[in-house]
Amino acid sequence: MRFKLDENLGRRFQVFFRDAGHDVETVLQESLSGATDRQIYDASRRERRCLVTLDLDFADVTRFAPEKTDGIVVFRPPKNPSLHTLELVVQRFLEALEQMPIAGNLWIVEMGQIRIHQPSDRP
């Protein structure tokens, strides 16, 4: 699968995605550092990449419609997480991805659960 990591995740997490066999780019690699949320969303759509971020703004389905994307993932770790905790959240997501497709959906990934928003107009 193809992913775009927002700048709040950086290159460190890119390794986890690559090790799981995914094609992954970062916002920083694509010179989108400091870009607006809309620009990052639009770039992800154009490139047909699932957007992965810590930015809760992307969970607003009225502004960033997941059904028009290859998926949006918002990681919600506990407040002030350690690097290890963030790594666990990423690993949880990658394991869940093997069980269910993400295209067109918004996933909110937390330590103990993954909430999936599916557009209501789907059959």
Image: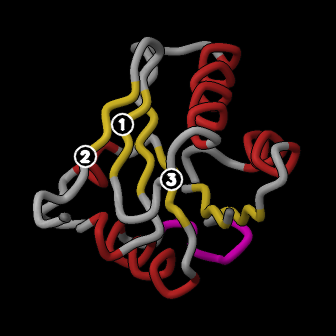
Q: Amino acid at mark 2?
A: His
Q: Tally the numbered discs.
A: 3
Mark 2, secondary structure of its residue = strand
Whether pointer 3 and pointer 2 mark residues with C-beta atoms closer than 8 Å, the reply is no
Residue closest to the eye, 75 or 48: 48
Question: What residue appears at the point 61 percent right and 56 percent down from the top-left corner?
Answer: 5
Q: Is residue 121 left or right of residue 55?
A: left
Label whose residue precedes the other's in the sequence (1 or 3): 3
Residue closest to the eye, 107 or 100: 100
Reading the image, the residue beneath label 3 is 101
Residue closest to the eye, 115 or 8: 115
Whether pointer 2 and pointer 1 mark residues with C-beta atoms closer than 8 Å, the reply is yes
Place residue 6 in its image quadrant: bottom right
Camera-near label (1 vs 3) is: 3
User: Does the magenta portion include 95?
Assistant: no
Query: Where residue 108 appears, x then y in whole percent?
Result: 36, 36
Question: What residue appears at the point 44 percent right and 48 percent down from the top-left corner?
Answer: 73
Q: Looking at the image, which residue sits at the far front?
A: 123
- Placement of the C terminus among the 4 image quadrants: bottom left
Q: In the image, which residues are magenta?
A: 28-34
10 Å crowding of disc 2: few (<14), some (14-19), many (20+): some
Query: Where residue 14 appears, x then y in whole percent?
Result: 77, 49
Reading the image, the residue beneath label 1 is 108
- Placement of the N terminus among the 4 image quadrants: bottom right
Q: Amino acid at mark 1?
A: Ile
Q: Amino acid at mark 3?
A: Pro
Reading the image, the residue beneath label 2 is 117
